[in-house]
Image (tube, coloured by chain):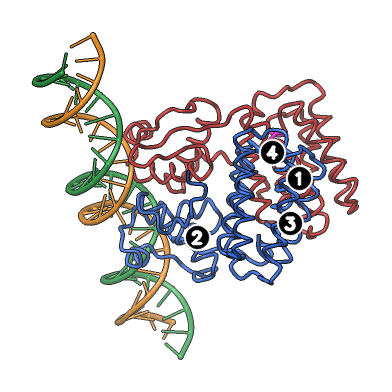
Chain colours: A blue, B red, C green, D orange
Amino acid sequence: MVLFKFNDDTEISNAPISTSLLAKLQRDILTGKLKPGQKLTEQELCKEYDVSRTPIREALRQLEADGLVENILNRGSFVIGMSEQDYEDMFEMRKAYEIQAVEWAIERITEEEMDRLEETFEFMEFYTMRNDIDKMLVINSGFHQVIYEASHNRMLQKLLSSYQNFLKYKGAEAVRDENYLTTVLAEHREIFRAIKEKDVKAGKLAMEIHINRAKERRCG
Amino acid sequence: MVLFKFNDDTEISNAPISTSLLAKLQRDILTGKLKPGQKLTEQELCKEYDVSRTPIREALRQLEADGLVENILNRGSFVIGMSEQDYEDMFEMRKAYEIQAVEWAIERITEEEMDRLEETFEFMEFYTMRNDIDKMLVINSGFHQVIYEASHNRMLQKLLSSYQNFLKYKGAEAVRDENYLTTVLAEHREIFRAIKEKDVKAGKLAMEIHINRAKERRCG
DNA sequence: AATCGTATAATTGTATACAAGAATACAAAG
DNA sequence: CTTTGTATTCTTGTATACAATTATACGATT
């Protein structure tokens, strides 16, 4: 059973070009390789990625829907990107919805999802023992994803997933002190326990604490 | 000065075809003309709208980003649409953020935006006097838009705008009793007054009341 | 020298052409 | 009659070609 796809879409092979292009452009914009205001000329992107304009334009349209790019009629696409204020705002919005997600998850979680959450948490314990921070970051994301799914709220799931996608490049520069793994594990244990025991109040509180600490750590 | 664009994007002329196509397809999916599970064959859409596949595909990509359509590799696009549960969930999410928006708006609103909010409210009074429900629905949307802008939170603005866009077709079948206009006006007056007086607590409360009533009315 | 106008080049918007994979129809085997 | 394999058709994915708009270069005029 495959629990976690290491979903770096930039290297998906069996997908339309525009999908991997989208992921690459998202990455390049969010990491600052492509800067706000910069013109994205289709021809240059064609040469850069060695594909024709069709998939390029499709990727640009999706970036536009994400709000990372602005398209001006007959003049082309320009990078919008994310300001520090944008990140701050997104973080605040994420926090509120992560807390709400716990409540809905407790109300609606299925047995299968509960098993998956437990299994995911056990992976966290395993990687903490192994002291594997990179794996932990992936599992961390996965743990929250299970909660999103368990909320059975498509809107919430889509939104929080996209926020994760936006914020993940911030996490790369995270403070990783010696207590990172054990601290994060403890925080997730509280969340997991509350969900298992269907304790809404405790779950929301545990999530709030976790997200606030995540902000201080500048990563999940 | 143009206060309100009657933004039925289905009739924008000076825009790429894919933009008006997107609006039309959104409308057709949200009003149920195109049903969940239905295959959207590019050729058929070409004939339907008398354009080539290029703009069709671009519109489909954006619908995919909206979550209204699912794209399966080499098999095409399928309508996802919005279930009643989706609408319910979206409404709950919207509520949380409309309330949050008031708080941020009060903290960050500029003089220009305050003027615009006042002007918008005065239009509401005018159209209430004129008993013009259709205009009222548009102004109602505009009033909230000003608050979104005043929150100076791009993420929030984008999210709530898209929710408005999704929910607007629901409003068309709204209960429109004889008190609709005066009730809605009174609700907005409370919100407006609280923002003008920078009373966060009153503003959030007024918005919560307004949104809850809007849910009962099944429209803004 | 600065500004305006025109011609040219470059870029986007749209349509079409070609390639690759998926669905369908149908025949042959069990 | 059902099933399986294959050929054909259809659809999508990608590249290219053409049209329309915008940007640039350069010379003429003041």
Picture residue at 50% right of the left edge, 71% below the top = A33
Relative placement, left or right, of A121 versus B143 is left
- Above or below residue C29? Residue B167 is below
Residue A36 in the image, given as x and y percentages of width and height: 55, 68
Relative placement, left or right, of B50 versus A64 is left
Picture residue at 81% right of the left edge, 37% below the top = B125
Q: Give yes or no for contact between labels 3 and 2 (Cβ–Cβ under 8 Å).
A: no
- Mark 1 — on which chain does it sit? B
Main SS class of the magenta portion in the image: helix
Q: Give yes or no for contact between labels 1 and 2 (Cβ–Cβ under 8 Å).
A: no
* Sequence-wise first label, 3 or 2: 2
Which residue position is annotated with label 4?
Answer: A105
Magenta range is: B135-141
Res B162 seen here: no
Picture residue at 77% right of the left edge, 20% below the top = B177
Q: Secondary structure at mark 4?
A: helix
- Mark 2 — on which chain does it sit? A
Query: How many neighbours does mark 1 have within 10 angstroms: few (below 14), some (14-19), or many (20 or more)?
Result: many
Measure the alpha-carbon separation of dots 3 and 1.
50 Å
Q: Foreground: A42 or B13?
A: A42
Q: Foreground: A151 or B138?
A: A151
Res B82 seen here: yes
Identity, as a three-letter code, of the amino acid under mark 1: Thr
User: Is disc 2 on the same chain as disc 4?
Assistant: yes
